[in-house]
């Protein structure tokens, strides 16, 4: 090999290695300090602040957290324009005995957000809640218990139908409820049967490892989620029926018990995009045909905890996680995947006036502002912060 070719090869290899260690720090990005233990400022305390539900209403990023066992979670609001945590609400003020708000938020037309809670103790009940911003405060309403003795693992809301749809924990039952109260309709077809329970036991999986983490609604008002083992279901409210779709989740042979939906996003053409937790594969679901198209992996790690479309038409998502760290990626049919790497955004807070570069090692949630301008990400650490970047 000629010396010039060898030098070119070495430089190219060095460039690739260097690229792997570059951080994603786009112009205008910033981190907001949401959590800090024993601080004189308005902050969330340690071990109660993993941001497991996230939505953006106007200028505010609204978060719901999960806590360690024996502790209670919070709801909070961050002003994106002020880059500041402004409101904190301990859930125990309204509903004691709860440990997590991990269901995701269902969004109403009047700015109301709906979520579900997970109880701190096995056998106790999770609740449905309505969350509203009112005059600089967070107002929380207890909407009752949808499935007695079970938590609310996933939740979404259809404003047109006025219905809340959810997955209970640990049984994995699908339920339909109303924000106005009344008994929930419960469907057992989504719960593991004897055969699938055997698979889950063989892989030493807990219900939280196998149940659908999020739900989605298509333009016809039908609801989608996953169920063990590695199946997708669809609920049609017009006929009140649960059907199992013929196409399974994308899978790697021998690992299908690990398959479940981590996140959903609805494209402008009405197609549903989902993330498979087991192997971190992105897929597209055509609501008209039920066909599932495997779009491959963003990175060589499992999990796809959050995906959303921004105003540039790209799908942004969070891939990977512990024991590694999260990667931010973008996807479009014309460009394919772009691994944006590990986000590192400047944080400016009292005592940090010179700013620090904050890295998002374990990102668990992702949302996009109503105008599609900002992508907002929440950490799920012992001390979790909010990370925001603008989309050009």
Image (tube, helix red, strand yellow):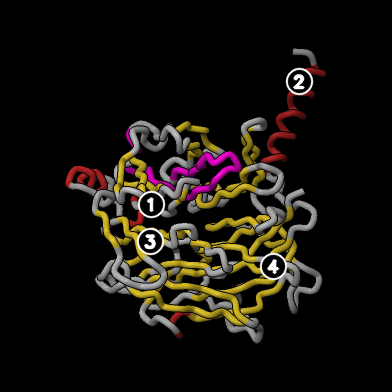
Residue 69 appears in the rendering = no
Label 4 or label 2, whichever comes before in sequence order: 2
Toward which corner of the image does residue 117 lie, by quadrant? bottom left
Query: With respect to residue 117, does 275 lie above or below?
Result: above
- Separation of marks 4 and 3 at Cα, in angstroms: 27 Å
Q: Which residue is mark 4?
A: 59
Q: Which residues are magenta?
A: 254-276
Of circles 4 and 1, the one toward us is 4
Q: Residue 212 got which mark? A: 1
Q: Which residue is mark 2?
A: 6
Residue 322 at what x, y percent from top left?
49, 53
Of circles 2 and 3, the one toward us is 3
Residue 29 at what x, y percent from top left?
74, 58
Foreground residue among 358 and 372: 372
Q: Which residue is mark 3?
A: 153
- Separation of marks 2 and 3 at Cα, in angstroms: 56 Å
- Separation of marks 1 and 3 at Cα, in angstroms: 8 Å
348 left or right of 305?
right
């Amino acid at each position: 090999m000629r010396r010039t070719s060898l030098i070119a090869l070495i430089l190219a290899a060095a460039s690739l290695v260097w690229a792997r260690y570059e951080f994603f720090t786009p112009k205008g990005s910033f981190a907001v300090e949401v959590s800090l233990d024993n601080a004189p400022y308005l902050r969330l305390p340690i071990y109660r602040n993993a941001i497991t539900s996230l939505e953006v209403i106007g200028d505010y990023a609204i978060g719901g957290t999960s806590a360690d066992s024996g502790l209670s979670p919070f709801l909070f609001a961050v002003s994106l324009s002020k880059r500041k945590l402004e409101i904190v609400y301990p859930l125990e003020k309204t509903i004691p005995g709860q440990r997590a708000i991990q269901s995701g938020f269902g969004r109403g037309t009047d700015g109301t957000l709906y979520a579900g809670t997970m109880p701190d103790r096995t056998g106790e009940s999770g609740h449905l809640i309505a969350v509203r911003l009112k005059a600089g405060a967070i107002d929380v309403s207890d909407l009752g218990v949808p499935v007695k003795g079970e938590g609310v693992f996933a939740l979404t809301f259809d404003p047109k139908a006025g219905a809340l749809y959810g997955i209970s924990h640990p049984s994995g039952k699908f339920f339909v409820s109303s924000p106005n109260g009344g008994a929930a309709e419960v469907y057992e077809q989504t719960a593991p049967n004897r055969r699938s329970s055997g698979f889950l036991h063989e892989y030493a999986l807990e219900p939280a490892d196998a149940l659908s983490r999020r739900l989605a609604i298509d333009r016809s008002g039908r609801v989608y989620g996953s169920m063990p083992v590695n199946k997708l279901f669809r609920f049609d409210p017009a006929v009140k029926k649960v059907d199992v779709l013929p196409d399974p989740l994308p899978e790697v042979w021998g690992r299908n018990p690990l398959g479940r939906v981590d996140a959903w996003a609805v494209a402008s053409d009405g197609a549903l995009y989902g993330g498979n937790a087991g192997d971190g594969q992105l897929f597209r679901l055509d609501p008209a045909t039920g066909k599932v198209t495997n779009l491959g992996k963003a990175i060589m790690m499992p999990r796809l905890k959050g995906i959303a479309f921004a105003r540039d038409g790209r799908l942004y998502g969070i891939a990977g996680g512990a024991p590694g760290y999260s990667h931010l990626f973008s996807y479009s049919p014309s460009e394919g995947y772009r691994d944006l790497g590990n986000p590192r955004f400047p944080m400016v807070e009292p005592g940090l006036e010179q700013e620090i570069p904050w890295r998002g090692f374990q990102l668990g949630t992702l949302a996009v502002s109503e105008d599609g301008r900002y992508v907002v990400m929440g950490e799920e650490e012992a001390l979790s912060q909010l990370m925001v970047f603008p989309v050009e």
